[in-house]
Structures are given as C-alpha cells and as structure tokens.
Amino acid sequence: MENNTEGWIKTTCAYCGVGCGVEARPNAQGSLDIRGDKSHPANYGKLCSKGLALGETVGAHGRLLQPQIEGKPHSWERALNHVADKFNQLIEQYGKQAVAFYVSGQLLTEDYYVANKLMKGFIGSSNIDTNSRLCMSSSVAGHQRAFGADIVPGCYEDIELADLVILAGSNLAWCHPVLYQRLRAAKAERNTKVIVIDPRKTASCDIADLHLALKPGSDIALFNGLLAYLSEHNYLNQDYINAHTEGIDSALDTAYRFGDIGSVQATTGLSHSEINTFYSLFARTHKTVTLYSQGINQSSSGTSKVNSILNCHLATGRVGLPGCTPFSVTGQPNAMGGREVGGLANMLAAHMSFDDPEHHQLLSQFWRTDNLSTAPGLKAIDMFDAVEKGEIKAIWIMATNPAVTLPESERINTILENCPFVVVSDCMAQTDTLRHANVALPAQGWSEKSGTVTNSERRISRQRRILPTPGAGKPDWWIISEIGKRMGYPTAFNYRHEGEIFNEYAAMTTLSNDLNHHNQRGSRHHIHPAKSQASSSTPRLLNLQGLINLSPQQYHQLSPQQWPVYLCNQPTTRLLSNGQFLTPSGKGQFIATPFQQPASSPCQQYPLILNTGRIRDHWHTLTRTGLSARLSEHISEPFITLHPLDAESYDLKSGQLAQLSSHYGQACLRVKISQDSHIGHAFAPFHWSNSTTSLGKINSLIGTHRDPLSGQPEFKYTPINLTPVTGNSEAWLVTQAIITKQQFQQYAIENWVLQRIQHGYLYRIISEQMPQQLSIQLQHLLTNTDSVSDPHERPRQHLVIQNHREYRVVHLNDHHIQAASVVTHAQNKLDKDYLYTLLNCPLSDLAVQAILTGQSSPDHQTGRTICACKKVGVHTITQAIKTHQLNSIQGIKHCTQAGSGCGSCLPELQCLLDEANNTVIKHTIDA
C-alpha cells in the first residue's frame, strides 16, 4: 500500500543507490515528517542522516519557479516551442549529431526512458550520456566483458549471509550508511570478517578485521596477486572454470607478474603479513562478498580493476550465490534504472546492443521509427569536448550540475558559456550550470514527482508525489515529451501519465526475450505493439514481463520488487547463480588485466597525490543537502586532509588555509591534519561549487584522464602542490539571505564559504584586510545589500562591540537580529558557535547576550554536530562523557542518543571517548 490512515505515504529516498524506503507526511510547517519504511527490503525502517533530513530540503525556497529564456520569464508554451524550434533548426543545418543530452541518475526511470527514446529513437543520434558515467561506467564495462551484459549479481541479503565481506574502494559507512548498518549488525551477530581495501583509514575501518591501506592505484596488482595465489595454492574451482568460463590461461599469465607476495608488496606498499592474511582468508572462505564502489571505478584503469576482482570470483565459482558474489554498489538513486533503459551513450536500450542487428530491428519496430541510431554516441567527456570544438551546437542538461562535477570544471564552464544553445531543466534556481542556460525549464523535485527508481540490488521502488509543486514546475518526462511532440513526433510521446511510460518500458524488455526457451513475454504492450518473432540473440536477463500492462491503480500501488529471471520456469533473483552467462558462448569470461600506472604521476612541480570523494552528510553539489542546517553542521566547509609530515614540510597547521594547484587549476581549502592517509597523499571532498564557495571547488584541479573503455574519469589520483595562504583577518557573517559572489567582490572579499543555518546563512571569510577594515566593509555590505528575506526590510540599526581581540556587529530591525558578524585576527580561535542560532532572535534572548560578551550561553553550547540523525553536538557528547564518566559508545547512546540513528558517527564517538580517556590517563600520570 502507498499510504495508511495516519497520512504516511510510502516513497523512496532521493540519495544514494541503496534505495531506502521512506514514509513521509506533510506537516503544519509546510515541510515533511520523515521516517523509515519498516516494510521496505532495502532498509527495513533504517535511514541515514541525509534520509532523515529529507523533510528539511523540500518547499519553494531557492526553487526555479518559471520557464526562462535568456533569464526572462516566459510561458511553458513559449519556452517549449523555442527549444523544439531551435533543436530542429540546428539539426537541419548541422545534422543530428549537433544536439546532445546530458542526463542524470537523479531522473526517474520514466524520465530516462523518454529522454533515451527521443534522442536515439527519433532525433537519431546516440549523443545522450549521464552523470553515471562519472561513478559506475567502469563497473558497467567490466560486467559486460565478464558476464556479457551489465548484470549485478549481488543482493543486499548477501551481506548478512557472507562469512567474509571485502570493501574495496568503498567507504560504506559514509556513502551507503544503511548497508553499513546491515554489515555491522551481521558482524555482531555471526562474527563476519571484514576487510577494507582503501588507501585512507575511513569510518568503515571501525569494524574492519584488516585494513589494507594500499598505495592509490595499485588495486590491480593486489587482485592479480590474489588470482595467482589461488592458482598456486590449488584454490581454483576447476569444475566451475571448466564448465562455465573461458580465458583463464590468459588471465593467469598476466596475473603471474604478481605471482609472489614480494612483488605485490613492492607495488602496493602493504606488508607481507597483510597480503598473506588477505589472500588466505579469501581462499579459505567460500561465502565471500566483494563489495566495491568509486575507489575502484573512478580510475583511468577502472574497468581493468573491476575485471581483476571479477576474475577472482569466477576462479572460485563465487558469482550470484547466497553470501557469495562480487557486488558493485551504485552511487545514485536511479543509476541502475538509467543503465537499464539505455541512458548511457554506448547502450541502445533495455540491455539491447548496437552490435546486434536484430536488436536494432526490434526496437525500430517497437518505437515505430525509421530513424533509430545505429552506433554509440559520445561519452560525457567526449561530449563536452565536441561542444568545445563546435561539433555539438546545443546541449540539454537535465537534473545534474556538470559545471561542478566534471573534471577541469573551469574549462567546462567556459565550454558552456560559449555553447550556442544550452537548455537546463532543474528544480533549483541557483546552480553553477544554470548560469549558462539560454533556456531554463523548472522541473519537479523529490516529493513532487512520481515514478520508479532501481537500486543497487535491482529492486524497483516507487517515488510518489506527496507535496504540491512550487510555481510552474513540471515532471521531467512531461517536459521531454512536450518537446518531442513539438519536434514532430506527436504520437510517439503522447503519454497521459508516468504509468503509461513504465508499461511501455516493461514491454520493451520482453522483445524477443525468450528466457530458457520459454516465451516469457506475456501480452504485447497495448501502446506500441511489435511483431513477435523468434530470436537468434542471447536472451537478456532484464525481462519485466510480470509488470507489463499495469493498470493506473496497480502502478500507483506497486510495491518494491527485484526483477527476477526464470530458471526452469521458476522466478529467482539470483542472477548468474546457475553459471549461465550472457556471452555468445554462454560462459563467463576471464579478462587479462595488466597492471597500469595511473595516467599522471607526481613530479617536482606537483609532488602530492590528491584523492577526492564524498563526506558523510552531504551529497553531490549541495543543491539538496545544502538546504538543511542540520546536515551542514558536521563538516561546514571544504577541506584537505594531510599527513602530519606533509603538513610540516609545507609549513601548514591544522585550520590554516592552503592553496592547491595542479596542471589544470587551483582551489583554496582548510587544512585538516590526520594520520589516516599515506605520506604524500591528500584527500578533499568534491561537494562545494562556485555557488557555495569562492575558491573551494575541487574539480577545478582534476584532469580528464579516463578509462579507455568506460570513459570514466580519474578522480582518485591527481598530482598537486600546496602553498600556505596567509590572511590578516577571519570573519563569521550570518544573514537571512544569500550574498552573491559579485556583491562580495565589490567590498574586496575574495575568500568565503557558505553554510545553511537556522533562519539563514553563515559565511566564513578569510581576508587580507585588517580586522577593523574588514568589519567596516561588512557593515557597508549589509547596509547596502538585501541581506534579509524581504528586500524592503534592510537593517535599520546596528550595534558595534569591539576590543583588542575582535569586532562584533549586530544589525537590527524592529528589535530582531537580521544579520551579525564577528571579525578577528586570523590567528585568534574564538567561540563563535552562538552565531548559529542568532538570526531572528529578539533582543531579550540569551543568544543576543552571547554576542555582547563574545561567549556562548550554556543553552547554546552544543558545538559542532557529530550525530546529524539525533542533532547532537560535540560539546553535548564530551560533557556527558565527563559528567557521567562514560567509557562506552552504549553509554553515550543512553545519555545523549548520539549514535542511535544510522551509526555513521560511531567512529567519531569512539574517538571522543579515546580522547577523553587519554586525557584522564594523562592527568593521572601527571598527578
């Protein structure tokens, strides 16, 4: 059922590929109450910090409300006609390759399907690619080489059934927290062994029996060595290899370069003991799951890294069995759905291939088109290169922010600025990409749109409409369909609702798809019937024959379900478990994976290696999580993590700013010092953009080196250099409205970071101006800028407090605080936590007393958020540890509730406990 008598509506989370079930209910504040769906098989009621905060990210705030042409509002009719006419004009003048779509794993399956149909089926080009190219395309290519199709054989229950779980290039605790909870619980219940393979010590290492902190880029050496070890020590499953695979000899010949542990040790930097322990555990543990993600995929040799893992599972017959399989976990809520419908440039649709003439004929008949594309299109980086060269004249960007997320992001911004015609459909009004749009089309956001998503274990779930759409926003499938109609294809895109699109897609998966020589197609789709004919092609496992011709009511009430395959006429979700693959021979393919050095190497000019990735409470480019004050508190600004010896060699201290430079660009980040990384290696998150920071956009530094097969860029290995940044003053500024980059520049303020807080925004500023001068500039800025929600209510009075350490200014209107700033010398580390709750406070409030004294009142001393799920700050936790003499995480949970939500904060809680206990021990020794 989609709802119940209490008003809770079942839907699916908008974030990672776990695909958690959510129950949401509108509340009196205009947002949503959120709780986990206990009946959903992905999460059984659990949610992470981001999922729990979904209700804080909905509504009209910051939304794109009307279609715009060249920045001016227009009607939908005018905007749609303009886009369709422009596309047709450019296609007629330059050919069908002159138009491209760049889409997103944030789209629903129905949106993806219609976009793919319009581009490949009717425009006749394959120049449609997705931001999934940046996160999962190496897995796609690896699956296709080994299995014959992009098949993910794992199920989430395998995590609980395994005796050994290997996390390779996956910080599961932060990037897929609910799966991490399931793994943690399994370990506690059945003593599951956990091995983490990651250059950094991450939160996932909290439950690891072994952490293999290998050198970045050396994964192939490690897994080739494992394959050689399995052969040398007679752990190969010869019966399985002989019956179900091909190519073992070639793969072993390549792997034997690392046939002794010493050679693996030399390449990976791991100890002999660590390598031997890993190899021995893998060899002796039949029920092994290797779960991998971006640390494997985001590499110039990502596809080979994937196949080096798959080789080891094929060699031991551990594919698709309960608790026994390789398992790629996706990064976005519908990356899997996009792959299935054909949203990548090198795919046709529904696991049909450009290489198979029958597939082309089937799809042409099904879509009733004589213009179906015949060859793969341009992958993401190549697509933007073609825009730069003038080969692509128009690009339509849907639900993604490539001006931030693509490598060489400053170059990408220049490319978009110079592109003759850029269309952007998005739900948010302020993104780096939208600034380049000739036409902006307002789309519905999560909680407003309706459709399906497919998660990492191939489970289809519904996203449902819960709230009304602000302004004139429309579903993405509707926008695409209306433009398709206006381009001259009215009958092909005449959909009344998203359920009709899903029915058409489900029917398409059955086209001549005779699994096990039994006709599983069911009745032919009633909208676009295709002639049934015998198939000479290999059957495709993607077959939704049980979901075709759903009634609107059935579609509305569709419950979460994995798409099955049929073995001996019986449905099963255990893909490839019978050893039958989708290759021409029906056998799994071993792939020789020669070790490759990263595409670029450190040098005298750029001696450090930069690794980029996600952090716990943020997502992509902050366009959603950045709306939540709660999620913005844990880590509030972009940073770079350095080993202590590296920090010392560059004369950098914790909290200082450093300028990063690479061959491609620059960024300015706050320094964190930690022994969690190798010497010579650094880490920085990629979430911040030009909309949220002046100088902290990390993808400005990343080059376009990419995997030759998958086209996936190398985000994990960029040579950089560091330079200390010195400033004379530092400021915290809180306002009720966003201040633009241009407004800051008018007052010579060049280095700032934006954070959402309660009732407004907080800016952290570093300046070369002296404190008094900067304080005066900020006063002028606030006096002359619409720094409040209502531009007619600029601050009428201000109160200035200054001493030898700091300048504090409060801006008032009708005895309420509308803005405030604190300016200090750069080296001063003062208490500014009270600013978080200052906006809109009356003068009698204790928070106002805090700004008068420059100290937090006891009521506001919660500190930086540690547990976002339960909104618990560091001061609350440390005070509880001290007051109650706590010595366990369970004690912290009991006293503060911290750690009782998704569990992602548990490693930090342990660190706080260790610090407190070390302090007590030190004091005892000193005494």
Image (tube, grey):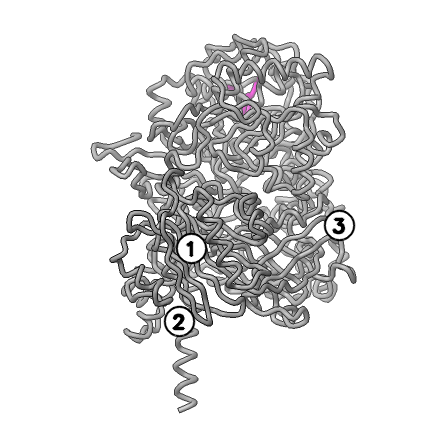
Residue 223 screen position, x and y as percent: 66, 54
Mark 1 is surrounded, within 10 Å at the Cα level, by few (under 14), some (14 to 19) or many (20 or more) other residues, namely many
Which residue is label 3 attached to? 599
Question: What is the secondary structure assignment of the residue under circle 2?
Answer: helix
Residue named by callout 1: 633
Kindly identify the amino acid type of the residue bearing the numbered disc 1: Glu
Q: Secondary structure at mark 1?
A: loop
Identify the residue under disc 2: 913
User: Which amino acid does the dot numbered 2 rest on?
Assistant: Leu
Between disc 3 and disc 1, the foreground one is 1
Seen from the viewer's position, the closer of residues 678 and 296 is 678
* Residue 624 or residue 34, whichever sits in front: 624
Marks 3 and 1 sit apart, C-alpha to C-alpha, by 36 Å
Q: Residues within 10 Å of mark 3 (few under 14, many from 20)?
A: some
Say which label, 1 or 2, has the lower sequence index: 1
Above or below, 400 against 685 in this view is above
Q: Is residue 724 visible?
A: yes
Rendered view: 555 above or below 140:
above
Q: Position of residue 600 (x, y in %)?
A: 75, 52
Marks 2 and 3, the one that precedes in the sequence: 3
Q: Are marks 1 and 2 in contact (CB under 8 Å)?
A: no
**Alpha carbon separation for disc pair 2 and 3:** 42 Å
Can you say which quadrant of the picture contains the N terminus? top left
Residue at coordinates 72% horizontally, 16% vertically from top-left? 95
Name the residue at 50% across, 40% down: 456
Q: Indicate left or right for 631 with 580 as reference.
A: left
| Type of the residue with mark 3 | Ala
The answer to whether residue 190 shows anywhere in this view is: no
Residue under the image location 43 percent in, 90 percent down: 926
